[in-house]
């Protein structure tokens, strides 16, 4: 694509990067075939190619965004399926992120939209505030249908019926490995996940310590910044990300880290992009180091399998993960339990991790099935299901329909947003992939499958 940015414009690092991306686009339209919003709405401007034209026109002419441009950019899920499809390597993620930052700085939204976005930015990234909001939403849930605004109805309807108690495992501390230490890793405990589902971090800690990892929850680490980043609130997102970078750098320069493990793929995509986000800032070197160490939990588990000593005694096939050592026995999963694997967009498109979770589940003894059109988004996409509830609901209905068609015993995913979205529309239990792997290698049955189960304590170092 030909561009006509001036030399003065190109001195802005954001414009320079967007110019590189725009020039890589060849208008082929392959992206339209895998774009969920284009599939639902059928409007060229709600496809990546259409949005690229809108962004190019806005940036090149240095004009204030108009309502039409903002509407179509807001409708983008940032699912990044277009990046997987694109034969020219167009880095749409960086382009749309820059466009959202530009819109946030130069477009005045209607009051209702400003208030909603302000509220979400000041509640969701903070677990305690989010818990209080969930309690309020739980009270208001029976009255959701009376709300005049579809976004308010969506917020109330998405509130879980039960809110888990605070897990002290999310506090800064270190958990001892079982047996010789193979790796020292920092676990990103996240923000929304700590309010919505504490079972995921607990299962991750049990599984990794069983595999010989010392697991550290670093002092000062918290929200990855993705929620505000995708709203275009760059100053807020960078402030949040900077706290993580400093927290993990202290661990790196202290006792050292072999990896920063992330079990929410939406966060993982953002943390892996810290190097780009901070490329022109004082924390550039530290940010690049953090990004290089960031691993989705499935990546780390595969690494641990590959690095297992060759002399280690073989394990039963259903244990599946090399190096497990059971201290307390639990009933194992039923033989051949059918797991419908939902591939989160941030994992399969954002991080290009497609086979690891399925391979781990299969080796653990599960029968893994995938829904039709597995590349299409479930409609969660961070805060998308709250800000674009009508489109999100259509995508959710399609995703649940294709998952249930496989008649699974359980649905597994690697992202809390997807789990909440899908779980709100199906009676099939929805759990995190790591919960099933923990269960298969000696841990307790996932609480979502037996809500009354009480989990054992996890040994700590400090």
Image (cartoon, rainbow, N blue to C red):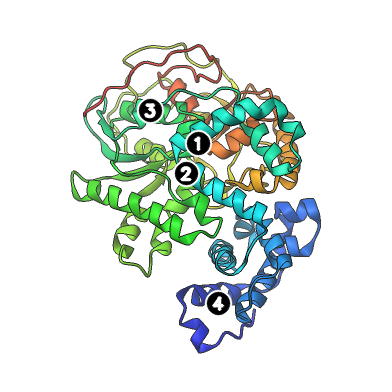
Please provide percent x and percent y for residue 40: 78, 50
Q: Closer to the N terminus: mark 2 or mark 1? A: 2
Distance between the Cα atoms at labels 2 and 4?
A: 32 Å
Q: Residues within 10 Å of mark 3 (few under 14, many from 20)?
A: many
Of residues 364 and 427, the one nearer the viewer is 427
Q: Could you tell me which secondary element the residue under label 3 belongs to?
A: helix
Q: Are marks 2 and 1 in contact (CB under 8 Å)?
A: yes
* Res 19 label: 4
Q: Residue furthest right?
A: 42
**Left or right of 147 in this view: 271:** left
Residue wearing tag 3: 207
Residue wearing tag 2: 125
Please provide percent x and percent y for residue 348: 56, 47
Mark 2 or 4: in front is 2
Please provide percent x and percent y for residue 357: 51, 37
Residue wearing tag 1: 130
**Which residue is found at the position 71% from the left and 34% from the top?**
400
């Amino acid at each position: 694509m030909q561009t006509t940015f001036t030399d003065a414009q190109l001195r802005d690092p954001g414009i320079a990067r967007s110019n590189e991306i725009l020039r890589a686009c060849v208008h082929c339209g392959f992206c339209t075939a895998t774009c969920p919003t284009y599939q639902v709405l059928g409007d060229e401007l709600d496809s990546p190619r259409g949005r690229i034209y809108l962004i190019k026109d806005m940036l090149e002419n240095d004009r204030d965004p108009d309502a039409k441009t903002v509407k179509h950019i807001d409708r983008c899920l940032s699912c990044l399926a277009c990046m997987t499809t694109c034969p020219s390597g167009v880095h749409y993620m960086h382009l749309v992120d820059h466009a959202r930052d530009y819109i946030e700085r130069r477009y005045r939204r209607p009051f209702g939209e400003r208030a909603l976005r302000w509220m979400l930015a000041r509640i969701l990234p903070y677990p305690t505030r989010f818990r209080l909001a969930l309690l309020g939403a739980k009270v208001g849930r029976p009255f959701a249908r009376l709300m005049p605004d579809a976004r308010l109805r969506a917020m109330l309807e998405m509130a879980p019926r039960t809110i888990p108690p605070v897990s002290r495992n999310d506090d800064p501390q270190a958990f001892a490995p079982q047996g010789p230490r193979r790796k020292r890793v920092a676990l990103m405990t996240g923000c929304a996940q700590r309010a919505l589902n504490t079972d995921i971090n607990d299962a991750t800690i049990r599984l990794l310590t069983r595999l010989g990892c010392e697991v550290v929850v670093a002092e000062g680490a918290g929200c990855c910044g993705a929620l505000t980043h995708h709203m275009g609130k760059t100053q807020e997102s960078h402030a949040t990300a900077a706290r993580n970078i400093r927290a993990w750098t202290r661990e790196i320069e202290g006792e050292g880290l072999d990896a920063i493990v992330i079990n929410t793929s939406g966060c993982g995509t953002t943390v892996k992009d810290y190097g780009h986000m901070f490329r022109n800032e004082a924390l550039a070197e530290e940010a690049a180091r953090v990004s290089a160490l960031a691993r989705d939990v499935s990546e780390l588990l595969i690494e641990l399998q590959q690095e297992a000593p060759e002399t280690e005694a073989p394990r039963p096939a259903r244990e599946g993960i090399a190096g497990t050592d059971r201290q307390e026995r639990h009933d194992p999963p039923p033989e051949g339990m059918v797991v419908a694997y939902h591939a989160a967009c941030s994992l399969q498109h954002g991080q290009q991790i497609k086979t690891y979770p399925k391979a781990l589940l299969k080796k653990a003894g599960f029968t893994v099935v995938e829904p039709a059109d597995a590349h299409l988004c479930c409609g969660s996409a961070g805060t998308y299901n709250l800000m674009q509830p009508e489109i999100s609901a259509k995508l959710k209905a399609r995703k649940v329909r294709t998952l249930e068609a496989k008649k699974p015993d359980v649905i597994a995913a690697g992202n809390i947003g997807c789990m909440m979205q899908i779980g709100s529309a199906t009676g099939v239990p929805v759990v995190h992939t790591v919960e099933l792997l923990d269960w298969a290698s000696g841990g307790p049955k996932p609480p979502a499958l037996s809500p009354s189960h009480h989990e054992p304590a996890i040994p700590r170092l400090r």
